[in-house]
Image (cartoon, helix red, strand yellow):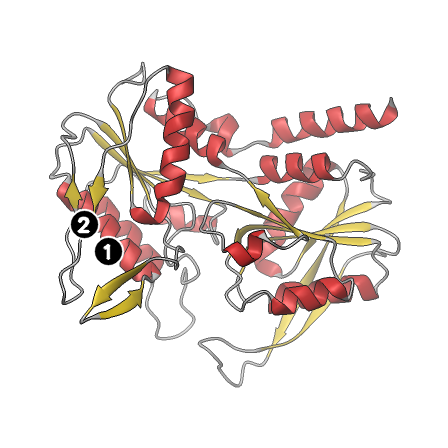
Amino acid sequence: MTNGNNLGIIALESAEKTGKRINEILGEWRHEENFLIPCSCPRFSSGEAKAVVGESVRGKDIYILVDVCNNSLKYKMDGELNRMSPDDHYQDLKRVILALNGKADRITVVMPFMYESRQHRKTSRESLDCAAMLKELEAMGVHDIVTFDVHDPRMQNVLPLMGFENVSPFLQFTQAFLTEYEDIVIDGDHLMFIAPDEGATERAVFLSSVFGVNMGMFYKRRDYTRIENGTNPIICHEFCGGDIEGMDVVVVDDMIASGQSMLDVCRQLKERGAKRVFAFSSFGLFTGGMEKFDKAYEAGYFERIFTTNLIHQKEELLEREYYYSVVMDRYIAAIIDTLNKNDSMEQISRPAIRIRKFIESYKNKQEI
């Protein structure tokens, strides 16, 4: 398999568009027409389902693409339409693996947003869903998992003998940011990266280090005497960092769900005198709709929001003038190409050197 032979890509319905784009990219690189293997997950009227794979996978190196966040898909059950949840997508993934019947030479699951990654630990009598999912895929014969900017990278400790590629998208964020804004001054007096909470600190530390600037962080004060929607409610965000008066600041996190925390952080940064506030988030879920973001943008709390196309993007999101979609298709294709050829993932999964080169090129252009 060192020459990249026997490559097969199975894109579940949730990742069908991404699968087609990746197939086209790999076809250009390898001068072959098609790597996609057809599959479907038809459902019975009861809502139960099965997976059907359209051709032989014997001896192939299979890459299964799934987007567990794609809530645009629906299926009929008892005559009514049900919207597919992450649970439904994960079940379909397992069905496809079962349909391969152990005939594939190797199975890699490409799951950009890791299923149940937000339930990565327990603080009381809780389930450990993410760990259980990883162990289940291992037991089903999966050899490798490719995911992006996982909520807690320590989850890979669940699988000490199995491949786990946690890929950083920050090279693409850097390229998009510095291409879109040519007036960013990259030094400690003009730019700062901000962690909106303790969990995002590692991301902000990484970017501030490769950019050579300072970082700040917020921590969440919570009311630990009560629980709302499964968690202790946030009372306020407290800022820890230096003076940001007149500076461009970038808030970095792995996901925007309802967006309440992100917008509160952006508001506080503007009130502290930030010149412009940008947001980098690998996954833009926007579960609470766009209205609050529209109002915050009109109020001047932020300049631009950057998220990737690693998960399904709602049309209403793509229409916003303040939104920038960071396209990751060629990166995923490069990952599949690299793994299929049994090459090292070091430069792809840890892009610090490439980010620094891009920054140096950006600075040189500014000096001309």
Q: Which residue is mark 2?
A: 95
Seen at 68% across and 36% down, the residue is 210
The answer to whether residue 323 is above or below residue 183 is below
Residue 66 horizontal/vertical position (percent)? 34, 46
Q: Residue furthest bottom?
A: 225
Seen at 81% across and 23% down, the residue is 364
Which SS class for mark 1? helix
Q: Amino acid at mark 1?
A: Gln
Q: Amino acid at mark 2?
A: Arg
The answer to whether residue 4 is above or below residue 272 is above
Q: Quadrant of the C terminus?
A: top right
Seen at 39% across and 74% down, the residue is 124
Q: Determine which quarter of the picture holds residue 190.
A: top right
Label 1 with label 2: CB-CB less than 8 Å: yes
Q: Which residue is mark 1?
A: 91
Q: Quadrant of the N terminus?
A: top left
Give the class, few, some or many, for how many residues have Cα within 10 Å of label 1's Cα (few <14, many ≥20): some
The answer to whether residue 11 is above or below residue 279 is above
In the image, 76 versus 135, the foreground residue is 76
Residue 11 horizontal/vertical position (percent)? 30, 40
Q: Is residue 140 visible?
A: no
In the image, 42 versus 280, the foreground residue is 42
Seen at 71% across and 43% down, the residue is 208
Which SS class for mark 2? helix
Q: Is residue 81 left or right of residue 147?
A: left
Q: Is residue 238 visible?
A: yes
Residue 120 horizontal/vertical position (percent)? 41, 59
